[in-house]
Amino acid sequence: MPKTILEVIDLKKHFIHRRGLLSSFKEHRQSIPAVDGASFYLKENETLGLVGESGCGKTTIGRTILRLEKPTSGKIIFEGKDITNIATGELGQLRSQMQMIFQDLDAALNPKMHVRDILSEAITVHHRISDAEVDRRIGDLLEQVKLKRSKLSSFPHELSGGEKRRVGVARVLSVGAKFIVADEPTSALDVSIQAQVVNLLRDLQKQLGLSYLFISHDLRVVELISHKVAVMYLGKIVEMGLSDRIANKPGHPYTHILWSSLVEKQSRETGQKAKSIQVGRWGVFDFERPTAGCRFAPRCPVYDSKGRPTLCIDPVTEPQLRDIGEAHQVACHFPL
Amino acid sequence: MTTVPILKIEDLRTYFYSRSKQAFIRSVDGVSLEIAKGETLGVVGESGSGKTITALSILGLISARPGVISGRIGFQSDRIQKNLLQDLGDFVNLTARDGKIMEVTKDVAGWERNAERIMSQVRGKEIAMTFQNPKSSFSPFTSVGKQITEAIRLHTPKKTELEVKECAITWLDRVKIDSPRLRFDNYPYGLSGGMCQRAMIAMALASEPSFLIADEPTTGLDATIQSKIVDLLMELKSELGITAMLISHDISVISRLSDRVAVMYGGTVFEYGPAKDILSTGFESKHPYTSALLASIPSTKNIKEKGYLQVIEGDVLDTINIPEGCRFYGRCNRVTESIRERCARHEPDLRETESGHKMRCWLYFD
């Protein structure tokens, strides 16, 4: 039985939005609930995929777990230790265990440093070892991520998208992290390069026993790489379960919409006419005025077809995640 | 093809000079394409294969030097018939040695004077384009509505303030932006990515062009928004019967929208033919590059078995040092002993292997 490496309990992260002079008074502050009560756990050697539209709080969850943001409330337990409020001094030690592959590597890699320096900096920050040892380790890393040695003296801007991604992965591995938050590691890459990165991440998981929190909005890739998938909407996890179940037997209308927006595209391939699934309305969600009750109700086709029941929009009965069997949890009053 | 193509590109070449490498980058190197009226041509390929540069070359929007070198772009709509690169070849002098470009001299002023004269009636009016990054393609200082009215005033007979504004609002409505009257006064930063893309499409279509180039219309958008943009393009296609060139590296988008597909690699077209043949998994006689590209997409089978994805080994072709033989030779996994010599030495030409299906591969030539 693999042990649980990370547990997140009712995690909340609210950002304070200040506007104008009056905002220095407390009552005029506006809080934006980017993550509003997320609970999940992750086992060793496992991948949890986190999907959802942009702006639903996926990245914020990742950043908060790594303590790059201070959580508003809730608990984060990493390897049996509560890290929700640990002192800044201990964070360094913590971050040698957990790391993040950032979304935008043009911004995450220092443009004025050679690849060699980027990697050696990461190693020497966490480990006091000799230069020769650092060199040997960089050699190992390059082999692991299949990057040519000649690239060590390049600057980030001289690398292609796939190579930059590899440097990002190598830097994360260099500190010996066990748990990795991969934030959109395949976005903006060509399919051929995307395949290379996905294969690399899986190889590394097998070799080193890593655990991933895989954040992406590319559903096919998430489905392929993850063991479990959590679907987020407006700061809440609305559905969680084994990736196969989420993709093929979704319980939440939102998950259904997400995945069917993919199937539609492929209708041409299978030669079938696209089934006209009602893909919800246009509305883009608004963090500043969340609807009472179920957050998805204003866009929900089920809510419409049931004749807009008050149960869905009553703030008292906001749907919570509940088990519907086979390790599958849904937060919906009328699961599909 | 029975109908006359609306756009016929022949042997288009667009080069850039890299000062740090002291060499010419052959971004577009002999592209030939045809687009028939009412059809959608999908252009796929990895990044750096010259898709966008081809599109920009058609519109004469290349500003870096030396830019477009040679070729023929025959454009034929109901209103205009001309070669967009008419007589421009005289302004360029090219010296090559051993297949390597040594020097390109171009009379830029002369070229531009002539090119502008040709393009003034075409760009925006006959051929419109939506750009890759809609947010940065709009001016941040002017409201979206104003920018659309600008296009309308410039390219259509509508001139009065009221008329133009109404027209812009109709178009915003047509691309399904809700409350278009309010959105008219929004600045680009106030619109979401999907809405910006829609506004961009509205702006391109407002001048009622006969040909639309859509460059990566769905990149960087969420899956739900992506499918809505695709739906929108589908609808516009069936409503307006617009001829379009769709550039994307998302093969699912291309397969949904296009009638014909061109697969690009290293600055040339590798394969050109009906979309249903090229992109279907059942069709066997595909270019090795196309098959490899399709195989690297996570398929249903792949996901079920949690298998590895197939990758194309090696890097995208460096378009500075283009090899002597086939451009894909180094990465190709279907080279057989009998043709190895030819693949390494001679570049295959774009030949018709079946009716309506052209290919650049020795494997299929007798």
Image (spheres, grey):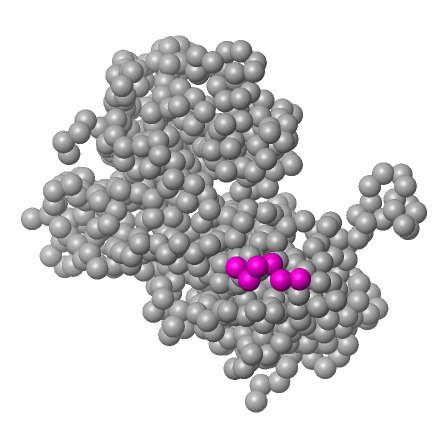
The image quarter in which residue B311 lies: bottom left
Residue at horizontal 62%, vertical 76%?
A: A322
Residue at horizontal 52%, vertical 24%?
A: B168
Q: Quadrant of the N terminus of chain A?
A: bottom right
The chief SS type of the magenta part is loop
Indicate whether residue B228 is drawn in magenta: no
From the viewer's side, name the closer residue of B65 and B292: B292
Image coordinates of residue A212 in percent, x first then y, are 57, 70
Image coordinates of residue B93 in percent, x first then y, are 30, 18
Q: Residue furthest right?
A: A25
Residue A231 vertical position relative to residue B130 in the rendered view, above or below: below
- Side (left or right) of B217 relative to A9: left
Image coordinates of residue A9 in percent, x first then y, are 72, 74
Q: Magenta stretch: give its range.
A: A305-310
- Whether residue A304 is visible, yes or no, is yes
Image coordinates of residue B187 in percent, x first then y, are 64, 30
- Side (left or right) of B95 relative to A227: left
From the viewer's side, name the closer residue of B82 and A201: B82
Residue B223 vertical position relative to residue A201 in the rendered view, above or below: above
